[in-house]
Image: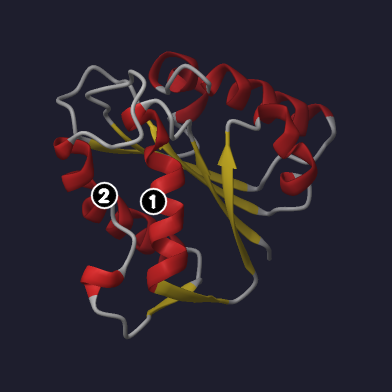
Amino acid sequence: MKTTVVGIGNVLLGDDGVGVWLVQRLLSAYTFEPEIEILDGGTLGLGLVTYLSDTDRLLIIDAAATGAAPGTVVVLRESDVPAILRATLSAHEASLCDLLAALTLLGRTPGEFVAIGIEPQNMTPSIELSSVVHDALERAEREVITQLAAWGVAARALEVPRSTVLSL
């Protein structure tokens, strides 16, 4: 079974880029098995259809505007997603909704879907995460690793001092 992890967001809009930063952190700190693809989806939106049309399990990482306190990590499982996806995820997520709809129309909907989000504090032009969202990266990383383990995907931490791992 193919598993795909996609970090989505605009790194030029502060906390909106948290999905991309977390994917970079995962790639710098772990090796993964079995078949897994980890993608920086940036703001590609429908452009991701090509990359996701053959995945069985999809994990999206993004900023999630749920109204919770900034830095709150949320995990949306398959049953949660249809009801709240449009209302909770960040501005570019209209593209994510379109992406999921396109995959459905193509008959390529992933068998399992999970979204992990971090409540943003600042989504104005900036290349830095707010301190509260930066501090939430480790919690979100643990959620990603936990979900992958539940799917049978092993993550082995690289023996790299944490200070050298991209953590923004």
Question: On residue 163, which mark appears?
Answer: none
N-terminal of the pair, mark 2 or mark 1, is: 1
- Where is residue 29, by image quadrant? bottom left
Q: Secondary structure at mark 1?
A: helix
Image position of 15 (left or right of 132)? right
Q: Amino acid at mark 1?
A: Leu
Residue under label 1, please give it.
22
Query: Farthest residue toward the front?
Result: 126
Question: Foreground: 50 or 100?
Answer: 50
Question: On residue 137, which mark appears?
Answer: 2
Image position of 31 (left or right of 168)? right
> Residue 73's x, y, as percent?
25, 39
Q: For the point 40% across and 48% down, which residue is it?
A: 21
With respect to residue 130, does 31 lie above or below? below
- Where is residue 165, by image quadrant? bottom left
Instruction: Say which quadrant the N terminus sits in.
Output: bottom right
With respect to residue 117, does 124 lie above or below? above
Image position of 70 (left or right of 94)? left
Q: Are marks 2 and 1 in contact (CB under 8 Å)?
A: yes
